[in-house]
Image (cartoon, rainbow, N blue to C red):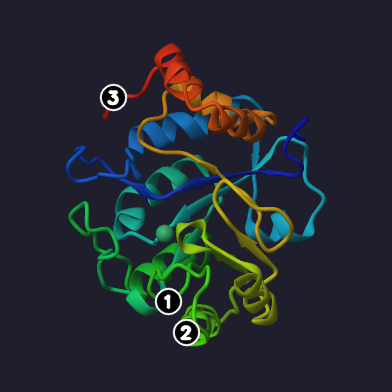
Amino acid sequence: MIAPRRGPLVLMYHGVGRRSAEEDFFNLFVSPDRLRRQLTALLRRGWTPLTLDAYLHRTVPRRSVLLTFDDGYQAMVDEGLPVLRELKVPATVFVLSGLLGGRSRWMAEMPDEPLVDAEGVAALARAGLDVECHGWDHSGLAAADPTTLSRNVEDAARALRDLTGRRPRAFAYPYGEHDARARRAVAEAGFEVAFSTHHGGGRYAVPRVDVNSTDTDTTFRIKTLRSYPAMRRITGRVPALRPALHAMIGRAERN
Ligand SMILES: [Zn+2]
């Protein structure tokens, strides 16, 4: 028996923007319209979106959700932020301290995307979003050498603090990759929480639920269920189940 999710739902988005399948090989970009639709559905069903502070330090309602956006694409400022402001929904954005103003060159399969610069970070923070740490340069941190680890954890945290005037409190592992040394480095650098992707456990590897451009209204709703992580693990063990499930509930068209 796999236990259902405990604690708030943590959704993991990446980019917000309209992209073609060629521009977005990994289905990372959700269009602003779809984001609006998903957040409106959450609010209508009684979900409370949390600030990072509420997530970390307050007693929160049962249906609470932390919205996270990885990588810090410039499109987050241009296309994501207007939707969040319109709906007055807080969110946490994970940026790469060493690539501010750079491009997402870690994905060879798709054209790289511009990343926020210092002004973009300031714009997100001014809008009330929590700007937190995704490392230095998107290096995977499982089995990382000590130099890579300290640059992506300590140096990345320090650079972000110098920029925002506030120590980052949350870390998101690039690719969701972590091991005991990476988790220890993150804890020792003073982070209060760290997020993985699907797998994890404990304060320094909190699993998240991925939302991407293939999600329909139905799959999005299924992903908010407490039983979803367990369902995902079961379909992962029986590979034939997942395509069958997708055939049943559909796959979104890009809009
Ligand atoms: Zn990332």
> Is 34 left, or right, of 237 in this rendering?
left
Q: Amino acid at mark 2?
A: Arg
Q: Are marks 2 and 1 in contact (CB under 8 Å)?
A: yes
Residue at x-position 22% and y-position 41%: 19
Q: CA distance from mark 2 to mark 1?
A: 6 Å
Comes first in the chain, label 1 or label 3: 1
User: Which residue is under mark 2?
Assistant: 151
Q: CA distance from mark 2 to mark 3?
A: 39 Å
Helix, strand, or loop for circle 3? loop
Name the residue at 57% across, 46% down. Answer: 198
Q: Secondary structure at mark 2?
A: helix
Give the residue drawn at x 69%, y 31%.
226
Which quarter of the rendering shows the N terminus? Answer: top right
Mark 1, secondary structure of its residue: loop
Q: Say whether mark 1 is within 8 Å of ligand 1.
A: no
Mark 2 or mark 1: which comes first in sequence? Answer: 1
Label 1 crowd bin: few (<14), some (14–19), many (20+), radius 10 Å: many
Q: Camera-side residue: 82 or 34?
A: 34
Residue 7 appears at what percent x and percent y?
75, 44
Judge whether 32 appears above or below 97 on screen.
above
Residue at 40 percent across and 66 percent down: it is: 123
Q: Quadrant of ligand 1?
A: bottom left
